[in-house]
Amino acid sequence: MEKIVIIGAGLTGLSAAYHLEKQGFYNYKIFEKESEPGGLCRSIHQDGFTFDYTGHLLHIGDQYFRSLIQSVVGTKNFNLIKRKSFIFSHDTYTHYPFQVNLRGLPTNIISDCIEGFINKKNYKHPLSKTIFYYWALKHFGRGMAKHFFFPYQKKIFCYDLKKLSTSWMGRFVPKTSLDQIIEGITQDPEEKNIGYNSQFYYPKKDGINYWVQKFAETLKNPIHISHHVKYVDLKNKAVIFSNGTTENFTKLITTMPLNILLRSLKEPSNSFLKSKHHKLLCNSVLNFNLGIDRPNISDMHWAYFPEKKYPFYRMGFYHNFSNSLVPKNHSSLYGEISYRSASAQKKENLILNGKNAAKNILNFSDKNIATEKILDIKPAYVIYDRWRDKNLSKIHRRLNEDSVHSIGRYGEWKYSSMQEAILDGKQTVEKILPRKN
Ligand SMILES: Cc1cc2nc3c(=O)[nH]c(=O)nc-3n(C[C@H](O)[C@H](O)[C@H](O)COP(=O)(O)OP(=O)(O)OC[C@H]3O[C@@H](n4cnc5c(N)ncnc54)[C@H](O)[C@@H]3O)c2cc1C
């Protein structure tokens, strides 16, 4: 008889469980290493403030996802918000996205960007389809690459852009035309509906975890929290927990990070897979969350910071997502700093520098900080290099042969959203448990 084990009760694992139950299949167990479900979509309540594991905004682009949100939570429990997002460079805020909102930047920077954009037609490089560095030069030209794309992507990924593949980009980097660029210089800046995130939903109360918690509560089977999977034994089809207990499966759905899964495979039968774990690259994000004892410290939702002198690549403002996230007459913010590897001391310095930069930019002092919460998110962004492009599907095929389905943002080793986490869980269930007619 089929027995399914799910590792991880983040959004993808919860979605797999939900869709199994929707098909009337209850012979499954879901295990989570933390003391609560939610994964990256948890929220922290502290001193009257609510912080997420850095800003998490809900973008609904898929009809099935919309109907699921509607039936499980009801969109009336969300604020629907039109994005107010900016880029801070050369001491100027310009509207996001950079490529169509140059107005306000110093004249020499605008000229660089236009000249580069016009001359890009002459740019030829054999890797301009596959490698981000050359792709950016081909599609945006030297000026925009230099003033935004290179410093920003280097900061977020902490990786050599000449080795970064283009396969992550999809909807994330909207292209532009000369007409749009000129319009963005000559006309008053306004938020244009460009990009996948021009508007977003955010729960009216309790942070992003509000809807994820409601989703988890729909499950009939229990979620086995505080169960850390230490080994996966493919030969005997069993997961082994750090407390020494074991659970057998006929099929395994795992959402734990793929590199850790490969490392956790029990020898001797899996040396091919196991040896690949260190080839999967990723970064981590230090997320500092601050509660501020002043109202409206900013009216933005978030801003990007490409310049090196600011340690964070992005800063956002929870109080503008929902006023329930802060006490009356207070504000709150999050800063995100990427790193690849760092000692405890280096991380402390990064956070200190990040907080100092936030204080200068927003004009507040230590005295205004009512509370703070530092989170270390790892992995955060997986790195799309050529090795990943060439080998990832082979790894998944090998795992599938052993009835293991590694899915979700880190299980598939990809750059994806909450919506995709739900769809990943659904599609996997449809694949491994064909609907009976
Ligand atoms: C910086 C950042 C910002 C983001 N912003 C947004 C946003 O604004 N909007 C958006 O839609 N998406 C955003 N995302 C993406 C979103 O967080 C993810 O797509 C989604 O949460 C992935 O869910 P998941 O279940 O696949 O992974 P996770 O949330 O990582 O869940 C995996 C679960 O597995 C558990 N687990 C791991 N190892 C083990 C083990 N050995 N044993 C048992 N359990 C284990 C973990 O504790 C976790 O609960 C962001 C992500 C990051 C990093």
Image (cartoon, rainbow, N blue to C red):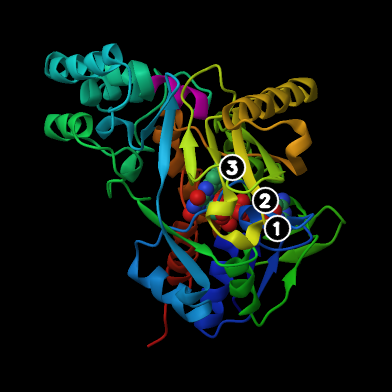
Instruction: Specify few, some or many for label 3: CA neighbours under 10 Å numbering under 14, 14-19, or 20 or more.
Output: some
Question: Is residue 40 found left or right of 133 in the rendered image?
Answer: right
Disc 1 residue: CB within 8 Å of ligand 1: no
**Residue 327: numbered disc:** 1
x and y percent of residue 141 in the render?
A: 23, 19
- For numbered disc 3, what is the local secondary structure? loop
Residue 425 magenta: no
Q: Is mark 3 within 8 Å of ligand 1?
A: no
What residue is rendered at 37% in x and 88% in y? 437
Mark 2: few/some/many CA within 10 Å (<14, 14-19, 20+): many
Is 241 positioned to the left or the right of 119 in the image? Answer: right
Q: Which residue is mark 2?
A: 330
Image quarter for residue 360? top right
Quick check: marks 1 and 2 in contact, CB under 8 Å? yes
- Residue 236, visible in the rendered structure: no
Give me the C-alpha separation between circle 3 and circle 2.
Answer: 8 Å
Q: Is residue 4 left or right of residue 391?
A: right
Circle 1/circle 3 CB separation < 8 Å: no
Identity, as a three-letter code, of the amino acid under mark 2: His
Q: Is residue 89 left or right of residue 402?
A: left
The secondary structure that most of the magenta stretch takes on is helix
Q: Is residue 336 above or below residue 412?
A: above
- What residue would you read off at disc 3? 297
Across and down, in percent, residue 23 comes to 49, 82
Q: Residue at x 53, y 76 (%)?
A: 73
User: Which residue is found at the position 63% from the left and 38% from the top?
Assistant: 274
- How crowded is the residue under tag 1: few (<14 C-alpha within 10 Å), some, or many (20+)? some
Image: 351 above or below 43? above
Q: Position of residue 256 (x, y in %)?
A: 63, 51
Tell me where the magenta segment starts and ends, as one range: 150-156
Residue type at the position of mark 3: Ile
